[in-house]
Amino acid sequence: MTTSLFARLARRVDPQGYRVSRREVLRGSAALAAGLLLSGPLSGVARGASLLSGRSGGKGKRVIVVGAGLAGLSAAYELISVGYDVTVIEARGRIGGRTLTYRDFCPGKVVEAGGEFIGSNHPAWQAYAKKFGLTMRPVAESEDLSSPIVIDGRELSNADAERLYEEMERTLRTMNTQALMTNAVEPWKTARANELDRVTLAQWLDSQEMSDLGRRMLRVSLEADNGQALERSSQLAMLAVVKGGGVENYWKHSEDFRCAEGNQTLSTKLAEAIGPQRLITGVSVARIDVSTDKPFVITKAGQRMEADDVVLAAPPSTWELISFGPPEVRTAVLSARPQMGTSFKVMASVPTAVWAAEKKSGDVLSDGPINLTWDATAGQAGGGAVLTGFSGGPNTSALMGAPAGQRMSAGLSALSMLHPGLTKEKVAARFLAWPDDAWARAGYSFPAPGQLTSPGAKALLAGLGPRENDARLHFAGEHVCYGFVGYMEGALQSGMEIAQRLAVRDGVVGV
């Protein structure tokens, strides 16, 4: 997901209060991390001097993980830490999934083409960053530079922006009150879950007392963040995400940082700890079969690999490329697929940050073909800068509907409408849309109305197997972590949760 309108307004209207609350949220995340990790000192589980020392805690059980994004790698890393024999299979020739760090686009700078922002309220990311020595770089806060909100081509005044912030704060307070009573892990256990799951966010927004401007900008912001039209978005799903992110902290602190070394570096660190002998790249899986107590995977090249459990950590949009057995499991898997959204980034690399010369931070929110822009290299030393433009949900159609060869130029044109100084610079550009990626085929998930109370949502969390209550096929990814759908945090937590569940089932750790 992206930097939200409310967070931007909070930094603009009350920068000091924003900084103080960010520090408080970080302290809370450090405490939460203790319950997430099987590995390392933060878990409280006794272990030897070497994390991956090959000890026999996993009782010789073998696990195959399909997908080497953050979810698959975190599951593998945590399982290996308590003695499981794990093999990770990745279809791409690289690791990282929908995180992708460019190091060659703007010399000396790291630029995120995929998942970008990390929250103070993201304990898994924060814990792994500490474990692997990665640095959190705060999102730049430039009180002297403007962050325009543009609607119908007109920039809102500071007074209008402050009124918009106050109106949104009042409106979101009603959602926060409901979120407090929501079960973010198993949303279907929330009181009135069936009713809430069938209410769309469009219906919820229509029921709020707001100005036309407030209603319009909240729609733009939510659709961009969630990658879906409000008419196709469940209110229960939104409540679960708000609860998972810490209610009020969700709106203010879900995108406070970037990883200074690049987000893909976390995948590299996890992979190095897992070990190259356990990681297979450039190989796709053709079949997953859990008909018996010894599930097996068959690669596209025909290699058969057996295990005690299989973790499917590939995006749901790719599941149709895999054959599942037995037939009832295939039916269950395909019917459980959550709704996936659409998003893109257009990135412009320039010799100087021309937006700064215009007294702008790079942050713009708009109802045009590009919803959000930001300085992707803010806080990084050296010359050169990159401006990123992002859109999600139905607003992507303006550029995604263009022929593939014209999207980049159309994206640059749209960026230049928001940042006219770009037209005076020598610009190198890249356009990345995850729906065009063969092994992603979508942006990120956000549940449709009715999905969270369906049998499929429960199956994704509990897993599937040859018998009831005997799951051998497990699911990991942001789409399974209902409190953090769409975030890298959701991917990491889902992998950790799988490891915890298997370790408890097998008596490796206590409940």
Image: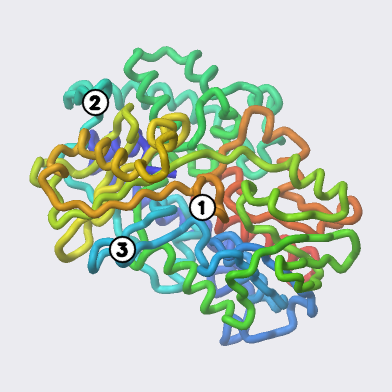
Q: Amino acid at mark 3?
A: Val
Residue shown at the point (56%, 29%) measured from the top left:
233
Q: Which numbered dot is residue 110?
A: 3
With respect to residue 315, does 162 lie above or below?
A: above
Q: Amino acid at mark 2?
A: Glu
Front of the two marks 1 and 3:
1
Q: In the shown orientation, is residue 85 left or right of residue 100?
A: right
Q: In the shown orientation, is residue 311 left or right of residue 402?
A: right
Q: Horizontal and vertical percent for residue 130?
A: 43, 69
Crowding near the residue tagged with mark 2, few <14, some 14–19, many ≥20 C-alpha atoms within 10 Å: some
Q: CA distance from mark 1 to mark 3?
A: 21 Å
Q: Earlier in the sequence, mark 2 or mark 3?
A: 3
Crowding near the residue tagged with mark 3, few <14, some 14–19, many ≥20 C-alpha atoms within 10 Å: many
Name the residue carrying label 2: 162
Q: Earlier in the sequence, mark 1 or mark 3?
A: 3
> Which of the image's four quarters has the N terminus?
top left
Q: Horizontal and vertical percent for residue 162?
A: 24, 25
Name the residue carrying label 1: 437
Q: CA distance from mark 2 to mark 1?
A: 40 Å
Q: Do callouts 2 and 1 mark residues in contact (Cβ within 8 Å)?
A: no
Front of the two marks 2 and 3:
3
Q: Is residue 421 visible?
A: yes
> Which of the image's four quarters has the C terminus?
bottom right
Q: Do callouts 2 and 3 mark residues in contact (Cβ within 8 Å)?
A: no
Q: Horizontal and vertical percent for residue 369?
A: 34, 32
Q: Which numbered dot is residue 393?
A: none
With respect to residue 274, does 146 lie above or below?
A: above
